[in-house]
């Protein structure tokens, strides 16, 4: 958690600073945090980048009838 300290300290609270300055500082911290997250991820997960998502789509899962549905069908027959 110590690596977040500079970001947290950079936030200017609206109780102590003008509202526009507080909003600007919060937006700057938010963008920094998002950029750092993307940098750490290596941008592997982002859809739309060519060559990143090369796996074929998954096959749909076959849904099995619940035991109660099978029992009701067997009793009706």
Image (tube, rainbow, N blue to C red):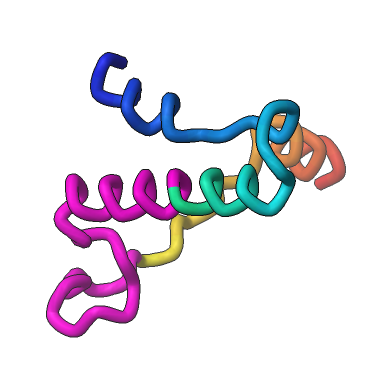
Residue drawn at 43 percent across, 34 percent down: 10
Residue 20: % across, % down = 68, 53
Asked if residue 42 lies left or right of residue 71, the reply is left
Nearer to us in this view, 61 or 23: 23
Asked if residue 58 lies left or right of residue 24, the reply is left
User: How many marks can you see?
Assistant: 0
For residue 64, above or below residue 45: above
For residue 46, above or below residue 75: below
Nearer to us in this view, 25 or 40: 25
Residue ranking furthest to the bottom: 50
**Magenta stretch: includes residue 4:** no
Residue 38: % across, % down = 27, 54
Residue drawn at 30 percent across, 54 percent down: 35
Residue 7 occupies quadrant: top left
Residue 74: % across, % down = 74, 40
Quarter of the figure that contains the N terminus: top left
Residue 4: % across, % down = 33, 25
Magenta extent: 29-58
């Amino acid at each position: 958690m110590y690596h977040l300290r500079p970001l947290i300290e950079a936030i200017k609270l609206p109780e102590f600073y003008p509202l526009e300055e507080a909003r600007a500082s919060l937006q700057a911290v938010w963008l920094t945090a998002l950029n750092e997250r993307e940098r750490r991820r290596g941008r592997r997960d982002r859809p739309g980048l060519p060559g990143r998502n090369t796996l074929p789509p998954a096959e749909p899962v076959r849904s099995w009838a619940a035991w109660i549905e099978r029992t009701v069908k067997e009793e009706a027959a």
